[in-house]
Image: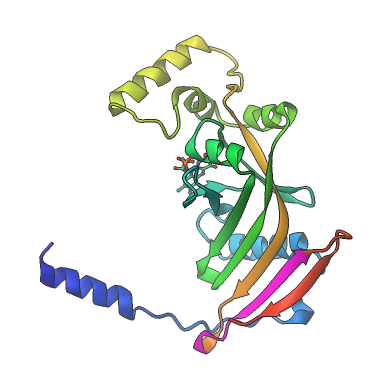
Amino acid sequence: MSERSNDRHDDHVRDRRVQYETAGLDVDDLDPSPIVMWHRWYADAVEAGVAEPNAMVLGTIGVDGVPDARVVLARGVDDSGILFYGNYESAKGVELFERSVASLVFPWLDLHRQVRVRGSVEVLSSTESDAYFASRPRDSKIGAWASEQSRPLIDRAELDKKFAEVELRFPDDVPRPPHWGGWRLLPEVFEFWQGRPSRLHDRFRYALTPTSDWSITRLNP
Ligand SMILES: Cc1cc2nc3c(=O)[nH]c(=O)nc-3n(C[C@H](O)[C@H](O)[C@H](O)COP(=O)(O)O)c2cc1C
């Protein structure tokens, strides 16, 4: 790309602005439970046709202390926590093993909304991981065996070969690999953000109190 077209591209990024004309979020709109609030907004996101409304950015602390982040899918959100799944030997798996804390961001941009969550993370019991793994399509199950997630791969053919091998190894039921399973984030803080005109957005933070209630604070945008 020439220097000039690069400049134009940068201008496009720099000058891009969306006016958020959506209705605001007020104290009266808030449910005392952030989980109920999350489900209300999730339903809105589904209804609005947001792509992958259960996708969230999972932030972890890298083994070198530098923050790390990637998108994963939420597979359960209730009073016990927020569930997600992957490879325990992946970068995130190692990071969560070393430092069992994480952040989540649900970017529901079509609705000018985001939800942020922070908390500690625990590994799901094998019974829980087995139950979820059993519900996955066969190809996804085989993929979980075939992929050494986050490790270097020589080429695509190596992965396809391993996939084919696993298919032969498990002609019927595919068991859950020991290196694959779920985590539960135990939320301590939620924040609901609603974009408003003039960048005067509405923000409400829910913080878990020592008596396991949620205190709600409005924040400056
Ligand atoms: C929409 C979307 C959904 C994803 N869902 C998952 C998921 O549920 N679990 C997972 O391990 N990776 C998922 N990924 C891939 C991750 O972003 C990431 O590439 C992978 O987990 C390896 O990350 P790591 O090297 O930090 O461990 C998803 C990616 C996208 C874009």
Q: Nearer the viewer, residue 98 or 163?
A: 98
Percent from the top left, x then y, of residue 48?
57, 66
Q: Is residue 138 left or right of residue 192?
A: left
Q: Residue at x 45, y 32 (%)?
A: 149
Q: Nearer the viewer, residue 51 or 98?
A: 98
Query: Taking 170 as reference, is 105 above or below it?
Result: below
What residue span does the magenta drawing correspond to? 198-207
Q: Is residue 31 left or right of residue 119?
A: right
Q: Residue at x 29, y 23 (%)?
A: 157
Percent from the top left, x then y, of residue 173?
60, 16
Q: Main secondary structure of the magenta part?
A: strand
Q: Residue at x 68, y 27 (%)?
A: 130
Residue 41 is one of the magenta-drawn residues = no
Asked whether residue 30 is in view, the answer is no
Residue 200 is one of the magenta-drawn residues = yes
Location of residue 190 by image quarter: bottom right
Q: Which quadrant of the figure contains the C terminus?
A: bottom right
Percent from the top left, x then y, of residue 23?
62, 82
Q: Residue at x 49, y 46 (%)?
A: 62
